[in-house]
Image (cartoon, rainbow, N blue to C red):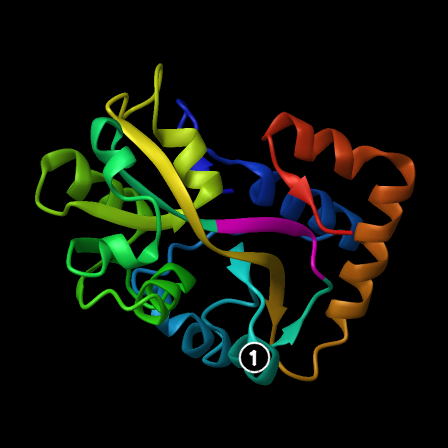
Amino acid sequence: MDYKDDNGEWTGFDAELARLFAAELNVECEFFIIADWSKKVFELDSKNIDVIWNGMTINDELLETTSCSDPYVVNAQVLVMKADKLASYPDATSIKDLSIAVENGSTGEKVAKAAGCTNLVAVQDMATALMEVAAGTSQGCVVDITAAKAMTGEGTSYPDLGIGFSLAYEEYGIGFRKGSDVTAELNAFLNKLKDNGKLQELAKKYELTLAD
């Protein structure tokens, strides 16, 4: 959704979409890394950032604490582990006792807990969760399918890792501060991009599925 290219510039589906919306508003984007994802709403309310825009799952907490956009991308939380081990772990019951890496404060952490996993390793981000599995310090991880597809399998950073079953399906939203009038402008902008086909083109470029 967001990553730096070879020139150190932010790119990805969300980064490109954010720049398009910024241009519509005649402003410029500044991208900030939230070191602790669990504190994303604090960063927003403290006005360190103006919007949380990074593959964020719509849930009750998000709807209560932000002015959330309409859903724009469909996602899933999936198990990733060494590809040659996947056949032994077909469902949530089979991984309850494994060491599972998750991004701290993420939906992946929540669904892993809901699935009964008791040996969770909370790390800074999904890239670190995948690194844990590749290094063998965790037996598996639960991450967004978007990250899993981009970073595992032949020709990727982790060719020996594979994607297993899905623990949950979800929709992504974009969060502004409570009471913001920009949310309605963004929703209208997303609808415009759907109508002219540009949102579908961008989703195809990054192999994403748009929300209805």
Q: Main secondary structure of the magenta part?
A: strand
Instruction: Give the percent coordinates (x, y) of residue 69.
Output: 70, 66
Instruction: Give the percent coordinates (x, y) of residue 46.
Output: 45, 80
**Which residue ends up furthest to the right in the rendered image?**
195
- 92 on left or right of 23: left
The residue that mark 1 highlights is: 60
Q: Nearer the viewer, residue 32 or 55?
A: 55
- Element type where label 1 sits in the image: helix
- 37 on left or right of 63: left
Residue 58 position (above or below residue 139): below
What amino acid is found at the position of numbered circle 1 in the picture?
Answer: Asp
Instruction: Give the percent coordinates (x, y) of residue 172.
Output: 60, 57
Instruction: Give the percent coordinates (x, y) of residue 67.
Output: 66, 76
* Residue drawn at (28%, 34%) of the image: 87
- 207 on left or right of 132: right
Is residue 64 visible in this depiction of the protein?
yes
In which quadrant of the rendered view does residue 123 lie?
bottom left
Is residue 28 visible in this depiction of the protein?
no
Q: Nearer the viewer, residue 49 or 36?
A: 36
* Residue drawn at (42%, 78%) of the image: 42
Q: Which stretch is magenta?
A: 71-76
* Residue drawn at (38%, 59%) of the image: 108
